[in-house]
């Protein structure tokens, strides 16, 4: 395993060495705009074998690939109009575009549905490397499955046994990378984009403000404060808190904060298996209901969330989790004068630390 510094080495030399390793069934560790990635020739089964040896158990999770541009992407996936728009306006950048695979990479990289994730990293060295190889490379993070996201080479090495280190032919060291979220993952196989994982990109460009909380208690207090700022609004119309965030990020803690602000004594718990939980309240002279909704299972059964329109009465509060499952309904509600929508994204930063972005 050789480590080469991006800052101290000639770029052409780096690309030549990395290309040689990739052509020889080897693995490289390379920098991207999100974290350090693990690269292998995505069309080479022997190289892909090493990727899975490196990563460990993945439970059939697909692995995205990096290409140089849309022209290269079209050799490996079907690019419909929606995908073409994303390539044109948002890439290179931290977005993974999921499209129907043409079956020209190792099939283990594809999802069970026959789709393949495509990345065009916003990192010139990587784009030049992929162009030199003239084939896509794997674009998975250079950590073992479930391990720490690597922002330094030491983060990579700390997770590897000696046998796993031997799998890597070359490491391109760009120093400490900025701590950024993983790429957004967008499935466009049906032409209508479906957000599978929210990362750095805000597609609605809401101009959100941001706060950091350091405990579930602080997350609840922030939700209570945000509710109190809108007290005059929900006396006249409904309030809908559209909550986005990965599993365990703190969406239910946020809903608990809303309950505190409404002086609801009943414990507020996750509605995952019930879908909707109702909490009547009376605050001063205002009566209403806090509706806590988890849309995850609805989408699995091809149901819509249009029923929330029945809750849009003055005084009612709706806390909706997994908003990406109800995109069409929410788009329609942005024009509905009966409701004010407050968009909230909760991101995991550590065991208790969260970043909360919000906009209305």
Image: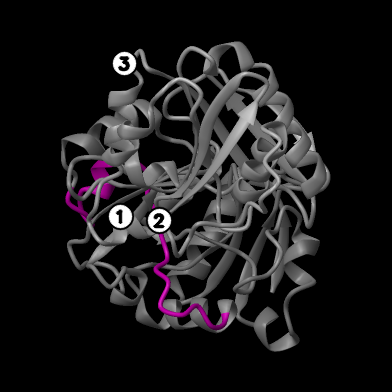
Q: Residue 302's spot in the image, x, y percent?
A: 22, 56
Q: Residue 146's spot in the image, x, y percent?
A: 63, 71
Q: Residue 283's spot in the image, x, y percent?
A: 66, 26
Location of mark 1 (residue): 299
Q: In the image, is residue 70 part of the stretch drawn in magenta?
A: yes
Mark toward the start of the polypeptide (3 vs 1): 1
Mark toward the start of the polypeptide (3 vs 2): 2
Tell me the residue at 73%/48% (across/down): 349
Residue 10 seen in the figure:
no
- Which image quarter: residue 85? top left
Tell me the residue at 30%/55% (across/down): 299
Q: Nearer the viewer, residue 59 or 120?
A: 59
Q: What is the total number of numbered labels drawn onto the structure image?
A: 3
Location of mark 2 (residue): 296
Q: Quadrant of the N terminus?
A: bottom right
**Where are the magenta residues, as a range?**
56-78
Question: SS of the residue at dot 3?
Answer: loop
């Amino acid at each position: 395993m050789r480590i080469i510094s991006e800052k101290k080495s000639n770029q052409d030399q780096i690309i030549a060495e990395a290309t040689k390793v990739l052509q020889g069934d080897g693995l490289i560790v390379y920098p991207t705009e999100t974290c350090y990635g693990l690269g292998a020739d995505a069309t080479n089964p022997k190289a892909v074998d090493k990727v899975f040896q490196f990563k460990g158990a993945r439970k059939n999770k697909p692995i995205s690939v990096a290409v140089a541009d849309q022209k290269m992407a079209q050799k490996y996936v079907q690019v419909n109009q929606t995908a073409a728009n994303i390539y044109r306006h948002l890439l290179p950048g931290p977005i993974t575009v999921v499209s129907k695979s043409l079956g020209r990479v190792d099939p283990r990289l594809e999802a069970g549905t026959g789709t393949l994730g495509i990345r065009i990293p916003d990192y010139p060295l990587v784009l030049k490397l992929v162009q030199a190889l003239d084939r896509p490379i794997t674009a998975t993070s250079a950590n073992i499955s479930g391990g720490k996201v690597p922002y330094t080479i030491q983060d990579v090495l700390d997770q590897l046994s000696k046998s796993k280190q031997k799998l890597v032919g070359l490491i391109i060291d760009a120093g400490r990378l900025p701590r950024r979220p993983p790429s957004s993952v967008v499935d466009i196989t049906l032409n209508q984009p479906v957000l599978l994982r929210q990362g750095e990109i805000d597609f609605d460009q809401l101009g959100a403000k941001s706060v950091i909380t350091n405990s579930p208690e602080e997350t609840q207090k922030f939700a209570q404060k945000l509710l109190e700022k809108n007290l005059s609004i929900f006396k006249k119309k409904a309030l809908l808190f559209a909550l986005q965030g990965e599993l365990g990020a703190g969406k239910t803690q946020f809903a608990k904060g809303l309950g505190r602000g409404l002086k609801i004594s009943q414990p507020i718990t996750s509605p995952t298996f019930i879908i909707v939980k109702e909490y009547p309240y009376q605050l001063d002279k205002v009566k209403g209901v806090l509706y806590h909704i988890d849309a995850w299972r609805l989408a699995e059964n091809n149901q819509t969330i249009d029923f929330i329109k029945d809750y849009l009465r003055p005084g009612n509060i709706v806390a909706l989790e997994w908003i990406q499952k109800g995109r069409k309904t929410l788009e329609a509600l942005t024009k509905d004068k009966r409701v004010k929508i407050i968009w909230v994204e909760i991101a995991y930063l550590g065991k208790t630390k969260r970043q909360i972005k919000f906009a209305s």
